[in-house]
Structures are given as C-alpha cells and as structure tokens.
Image: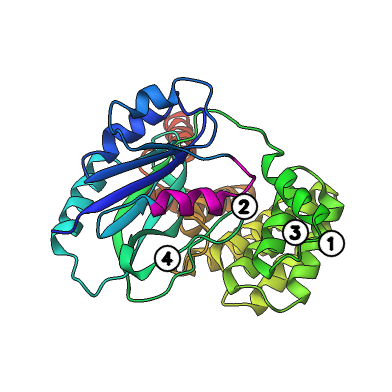
Amino acid sequence: MIKISLCMIVKNEEKTLDKCLKSAERISDEIIIVDTGSTDKTKEIAKKYTQKIYDFKWVDDFAKARNYSFSKASKEYIMWLDADDVILEEDIIKIVKLKKQITEDVDMVMMKYNTSFDENNNPTFSYNRERIFKKEKGYIWEGRIHEVVVPSGNIIYSDAAICHKKVSVGNPKRNLNIFNKMIAENHTFSAREQYYYARELYYNKEYVKSIEEFRSFLDSNKGWKENNIEACLNMANCYKALESKEKYLMVLLESFKYDTPRAEVCVEIGKHFFDLEEYQKAIFWYKIAVECKLNDISGGFIAIDSYKYIPYIQLCVCYYRLGDIKKSIYYNKKAGEEKPNGKEYLFNKNYFEKVDNEVTL
C-alpha cells in the first residue's frame, strides 16, 4: 500500500481546518501544514493532527506556497487539499482502497472536485482536478493565482471526490488584485492566465473589460478547449448583465465551434428563448441539452443539473405554458427520476396533484 503526504497551505482557517483534517487524517500518512500568516487559532488546530507545521511568508503567489509545502513531503505520493475541503465517508473508503490497489507506474491521480451543492447536499457543480502525485516525478505548481500542476505522465481517474465546503466569503478582490499586480509588473499573461483574469473581471462586475479580455483570449487561438467554451459562457453572462440579448445569444452559439454542444450552453440558449416566450424554440434547445453526453473526465467545469434535471423541469414549464398538460406532467416525472427530492420537481408534482384533485371534485 502506498503512503501519502498531505500538503496544505493555510491562513486564518480556524472555522474549517478541524473538519478538514479530521477526515483527511484517515487517508494520510503524513500531514504537512504551511501557514502563510494566520492570526487566529489555525496553528493550534493543526497541532492536533501534526507537528510538521511551517511558516511561509505570503508573496501573492499560490504556486510558490504550494511548491514549498511539496518540498517538505517525505512519502512516495503527495496529495493536496484546501482547508475548506472535506472528504466524505464514502470517498474516504474509496481513497483507502485506491492506496491499496495503486500500482508503481501511476504518476498522477485525478479526482472529482465538487464545489457547489443543492438543498439536499447533492453536487451541482464539479470538475476533475489533479489530486495525488508521485513524489519522484518532481511535479511543480505553476501560476500565482488559480495555480495548477500540468497533467503529465501516467494518469488515472479515481471515482473518489473531494467536497469544497466554503463557509465564509473571503476578499472578493483578492484574485483580481494579484492579477493587477502582475500587470503592474509588466507580466505577460499566458492564455490560461488571461482566461482567469477575464473571469475575475466578470466576477467583480467589470463586464465591459471582462468581455474585452475574453475576446482577446479567444482570438489568440491559444486557449484550452474547455476554457474556450467556459469563456463563451462567461462572456454571455457579461452581455446579459449589460442587457445585450443579441450578443448574448451569438457568443453562446460561438461556443459550438470549439466542440460538440454542451448542455450548459444549450440550457442557457433555451432560457433565452423561454424569457422571450418563444416556447417552441426553447423546447428545441432543452431537448438538445437532454441529449448531450456528460464527459466527466474532460477537465472542464460541469454544471451537473444542466444535463438532465434542469432541461426536464424547463420542458415541463414550456409545455404547460403551451397548454399541453400531458407532456408537462411527463417531463416533470422525468425530472423526478433524476432528482426525487428536487424542490422544483416536488413543487410541480404537488401542483399537478392538487389540480387533478380539484378537477375530480
């Protein structure tokens, strides 16, 4: 069975660190904590689980901090987590099993990263991330912000997942400030950095500037396919915020030139026509969304409910607006097959049952 060094960088994580480490210690053979300037009880909490706690002066560079944490690892494989990550019981079991079964030729393990959840704690947003690395391969983190280890070597995909459970909102301008500092230093952005810079502008409601950066990114033809598609989605949302409906629709359609249609995009186009009360057009796009295949190892961001549940719910509403109650009920039942506890499905189900009882009476 392989042994794993868990390497983490932390700062003022007293609200989440204990829960994280309580789950992580069950799959770790060594825990490395690199503190970048905590002023709360973070270190006290960390000492309950490890004595390998190191200080690192924060220099607005996540990759440097993570590489420092990796340098302290002594086991044959290295794993990383953030302080607000949690490993659920079923995933702990999967990782322990993986440790027993992994072969010496494996260099990197990809795992699902669930970052958003519905009211029943089911993941609604997920993507694969590089999670476990063979130490002797010398993998390094790249990027001051939105850091990454570029996947290489013999890679396997685990069905285990890590859940990102953020409990508080940090400084919303932190990432954007780092990017602006890089610009002030005359740093030339890579295509990946420009994509994330444009996304931070979008998150901070600098829509016009975000559109300019996304357009420059796409026109460079240097972007990764998944980032290109996501750029179109984010740029569309910028146009929506600016109430430019035509450009909103056109940039969504532009995403199709990078790959086959994604359900996330089709749902957005369906919503565009739904809002215009053009229900037949909306139905067309929602049905395409239902047919889209979810590729959960592409590395792209996945809005899980866009692939079945949301389009089924929207088809239910569209057919109801068109007066076709039979089809409306049919698609609501389809939504229920996907999420039996979905609040939208249950609301519609109760509504239809109430109407049916009133008609019977």
Residue 4 is at least partly visible in this image: yes
Residue beneath the point at 86% across and 53% down:
208
Q: Is residue 233 left or right of residue 69?
A: right
Residue on which the image places disc 1? 212
Task: Nearest to the eye among marks 2 and 3: give it.
Answer: 2
Residue 22, picture quadrant: top left
* Residue at 79%, 55% in the rendered image: 185
* Residue plotted at (32% across, 34% down): 21
The vertical placement of 61 against 156, above or below, is above
Q: Which residue is mark 4?
A: 139
Three-letter code for the amino acid on which mark 1 is drawn? Glu
Q: Nearer the viewer, mark 2 or mark 4?
A: 4
As measured in the structure, the alpha-carbon distance from the residue carrying label 4 to the one carrying label 3 is: 33 Å
Label 3 secondary element: helix
Q: Which amino acid type corresponds to the residue marked 3 in the rendered image?
A: Met
Residue 4 vs residue 14: left or right? left
Q: Earlier in the sequence, mark 2 or mark 4?
A: 4
The secondary structure that most of the magenta stretch takes on is helix
